[in-house]
């Protein structure tokens, strides 16, 4: 990560936070550090997005950085665990590299109050970032990843199916396609009962090819549902480049077909993601219907597990034995890692004088420890009882054991 | 003749047919048609036949199934490989279109197509959506499609060759749990019928019937039971539809005891159909069925492995039936 020396104090930024943030933005733009996309969608929309993030309180901004760090260290800890601890049974579809997307979107949502009050999110099979950004208990999530009886879903879910209804985290989905359709159903119910909640569906670039993408966008537009489809375009669906499933450079272009706003954002920059999400959420709450947000981002690890990764090192490099064709070159991985969402957020907050380098480093150390403690707690949790597998098929009772003849 | 893996054997059959028939196509997502075997040339249909004939697509199993169906209607042989995540996504396309078009057209429509459905129920820990065992009877229930489920590399090669040459749609169920199986498989192309079960061991005390991913446990249990003195007739169904009633009935007429074993869900598992057909034709026999409980596969290995039927369950049930 980049050096974070900073001469400014907290006192200085308190005097004039928005002025100094604006100056910092200008500096960023001047230095060419702000990422721009040549898409006409991005150009058309970014001027209308507004820059809501600069008006957030210091606490809110710090919280966003904290969330990004939590996702990063939760996953890095599990990568190392997968690589070094033979007793660990969990598997992961890692989200590292994409932290700013979940964080920026969830920062624009209401994350308390259960399904009747919280904004709802539907996740993917790469769910830990979404779960942490929504506010899931990391200890219980770590226990679930290792199939423990006291895990978030009592050992029934595993990584690909975790959910936490209490905060509106409707669940990870192992399947590519159906999620957004189900999410629009929640949005329909919300609109019918007159609630101001909104529903966000996270989906990868691979979801574009599914019939469910069209179904969700079309019906959400027809019924003006409070629905936001966030495409995390990390360039690869499973092992194939997104150009194999989408003929356009920007998937957000599809939004125009449905008369819905389509926005392309830099998914490495949490502030850009937040601004787009905030605009979409306000539009949805006001009854103006859905938005399609495409966040350009990148995953540092392979499709699943940690092939090519080394303990203690960020990212995975080299050939994945499951990938035969059209898989990412190592140079591409390294290039994306130079625009790391942790660094971008940290540098922005330091530039805005919300935190200084010392505070950022201290936050990082504290969060590393919090994650290590959570995983250590999970390691001590009890295993599931075999016969409990017959429970929870229906609300009451258990089904018959049929394996004994 | 050489020792070959399951998928190598399947792709060898496909490669041979694609070389003979320049119109034949293959559509896939995620799982490239590539297999290697020690000492043999790598089979890579994608590089050998090019993107015009072998296409990697976006994630849309519905399109994949519809595409090969349309290709078949237009007069080309076509195959698609649906990976385990999507094994039921194209269900409606096969149920309401592939299964009905020949009948609906008064016999005119020919669909020389193969839907390869990967089933990965053997994997503990994948949980819910990636661990299902049940799709064998889902597809076997559809009129108008043949549903086959080979359990050995040699059968897989012969049945794939037959499936491609069959003028009707064939659902070729590939139990991914058999991926590591290796055996002697002939190099030349040969045809294994799509309507015949096979008797793996002969015996007069008890008939055990299974298919696909269930067969390794059955063969393991049978060997142990034979050593303990029980004469077991183990039958591998191979074809769920059409089902070879004759072989089943002939065996149980002799043994008067039938044990079915499935990695499928208990209700309406293949064994249920086997028992029904035998019961219609054999008097005075005893029956027992082992299958996965009617529950979604839970994530925790403790729960999943306890629920999954295994060779010990077969041995215990066999002893109860024969005692």
Image (cartoon, rainbow, N blue to C red):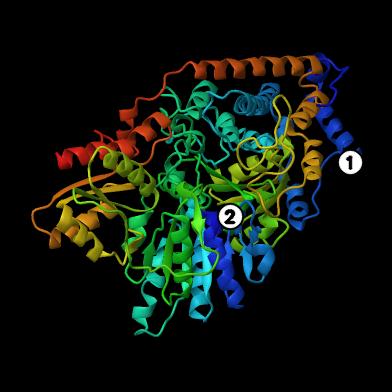
* Residue to which mark 1 is pinned: A32
Percent coordinates x, y for residue B49 in the rendering: 66, 69
User: Label 1: chain?
Assistant: A
Measure the alpha-carbon separation of dots 1 and 2.
Answer: 41 Å
Q: Nearer the viewer, residue A251 or B294?
A: B294
Q: Is residue A183 left or right of residue B12?
A: left
Q: Mark 2: give few (<14), some (14-19) or many (20+) Cα within 10 Å.
A: some
Toward the left, the furthest residue is B284
**Helix, strand or loop at disc 1?**
loop
Residue A215, percent across and down? Answer: 51, 59
Q: Which mark is residue B31?
A: 2
Task: Identify the residue shown where x is 73% and y is 48%.
Answer: A328
Q: Give B9 or A265, whichever is nearer the viewer.
A: B9
User: Residue visible at 44% across and 34% down?
Assistant: A157
Q: Is residue B132 above or below residue B103?
A: above
Can you tell which mark lies on residue B111? none
Q: Nearer the viewer, mark 1 or mark 2?
A: 2
Q: Total label count?
A: 2
Q: Secondary structure at mark 2?
A: loop
Asked whether residue B67 appears in the rendered view, the answer is no
Locate residue B158, reporting x and y percent.
Answer: 46, 65
Point 42% across, 31% down: residue: B300
- Quadrant (top left, top right, bottom left, bottom right) of the C terminus of chain A: top left
């Amino acid at each position: 990560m980049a050096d974070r020396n900073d001469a400014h104090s907290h006192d200085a930024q308190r005097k004039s936070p928005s002025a100094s943030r604006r100056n910092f933005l200008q500096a960023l733009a001047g230095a060419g550090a702000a990422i721009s996309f040549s898409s006409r969608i991005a150009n058309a929309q970014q001027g209308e997005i507004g820059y809501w993030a600069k008006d957030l309180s210091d606490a809110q901004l710090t919280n966003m950085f904290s969330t990004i760090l939590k996702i990063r260290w939760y996953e890095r800890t599990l990568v190392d665990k997968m690589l070094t601890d033979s007793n660990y049974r969990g598997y992961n579809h890692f989200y590292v590299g994409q932290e700013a997307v979940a964080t920026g979107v969830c920062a624009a949502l209401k994350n308390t109050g259960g399904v009747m009050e919280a904004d709802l999110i539907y996740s993917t099979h790469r769910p830990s970032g979404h779960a942490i950004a929504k506010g899931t208990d990391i200890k219980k999530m770590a226990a679930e990843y290792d199939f423990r009886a006291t895990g978030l879903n009592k050992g029934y879910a595993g990584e690909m199916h975790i959910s936490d209804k209490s905060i509106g985290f409707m669940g990870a989905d192992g399947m590519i396609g159906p999620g957004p359709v189900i999410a629009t159903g929640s949005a329909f119910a919300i609109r019918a009962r007159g609630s101001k909640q909104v529903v966000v569906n996270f989906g990868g670039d691979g979801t574009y090819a599914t019939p469910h993408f069209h179904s969700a966008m079309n019906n959400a537009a027809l019924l003006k549902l409070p629905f936001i489809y966030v495409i995390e375009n990390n360039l690869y669906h499973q092992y194939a480049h997104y150009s194999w499933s989408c003929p356009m450079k920007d998937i957000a272009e599809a939004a125009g077909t449905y008369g819905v706003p389509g926005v392309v954002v830099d998914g490495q920059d949490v502030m850009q993601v937040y601004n787009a999400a905030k605009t979409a959420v306000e539009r949805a709450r006001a009854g103006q219907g859905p938005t399609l947000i495409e966040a350009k981002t990148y995953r540092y690890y392979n499709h699943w597990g940690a092939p090519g990764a080394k303990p203690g090192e960020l990212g995975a490099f080299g050939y994945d034995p499951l990938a035969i064709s059209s898989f990412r070159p190592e140079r591409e991985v390294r290039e994306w890692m130079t625009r790391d969402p942790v660094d971008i957020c940290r540098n922005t907050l330091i530039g805005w004088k919300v935190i200084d380098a010392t505070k950022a480093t201290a936050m990082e150390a504290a969060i590393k420890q919090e994650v290590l403690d959570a995983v250590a707690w999970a390691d001590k949790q009890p295993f599931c009882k075999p016969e409990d597998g017959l429970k929870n098929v229906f609300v009451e009772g258990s089904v018959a054991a049929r394996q004994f003849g | 003749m050489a020792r070959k893996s399951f998928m190598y054997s399947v792709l060898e059959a496909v490669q041979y047919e694609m070389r003979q028939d320049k119109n034949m196509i293959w559509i896939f997502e995620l799982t490239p048609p590539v297999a290697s075997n020690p000492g043999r040339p790598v089979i890579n249909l994608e590089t050998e036949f090019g993107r015009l004939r072998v296409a990697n697509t976006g994630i849309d199993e519905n399109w994949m199934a519809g595409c090969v169906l349309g290709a078949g209607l237009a007069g080309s042989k076509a195959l698609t490989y649906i990976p385990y995540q999507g094994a039921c996504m194209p269900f409606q396309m096969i149920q309401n279109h592939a299964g009905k078009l020949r009948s609906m057209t008064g016999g005119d429509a020919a669909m020389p197509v193969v839907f390869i459905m990967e089933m990965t129920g053997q994997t503990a820990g994948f949980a819910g959506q990636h661990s299902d065992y049940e799709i064998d009877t889902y597809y076997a229930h559809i009129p108008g499609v043949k549903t086959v489920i080979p359990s050995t590399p040699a059968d897989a090669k012969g049945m794939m060759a037959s499936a491609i040459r069959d003028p009707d749609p064939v659902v070729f169920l590939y139990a991914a749990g058999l991926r590591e199986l290796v055996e002697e498989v002939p190099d030349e192309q040969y045809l294994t019928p799509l309507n015949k079960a096979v008797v793996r061991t002969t015996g007069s005390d008890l008939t055990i019937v299974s298919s696909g991913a269930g067969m390794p446990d059955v063969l393991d249990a049978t060997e142990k039971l034979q050593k303990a003195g029980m004469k077991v007739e183990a039958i591998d169904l191979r074809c769920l539809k059409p089902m070879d009633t004759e072989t089943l009935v002939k065996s149980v007429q002799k043994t008067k005891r039938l044990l079915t074993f499935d990695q499928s869900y208990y209700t309406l598992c293949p064994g249920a159909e086997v028992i029904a057909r035998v019961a219609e034709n054999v008097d005075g026999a005893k029956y027992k069925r082992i299958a996965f409980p009617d529950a979604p596969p839970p994530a925790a290995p403790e729960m999943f492995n306890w629920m999954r039927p295994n060779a010990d369950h077969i041995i215990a049930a066999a002893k109860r039936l024969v005692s």
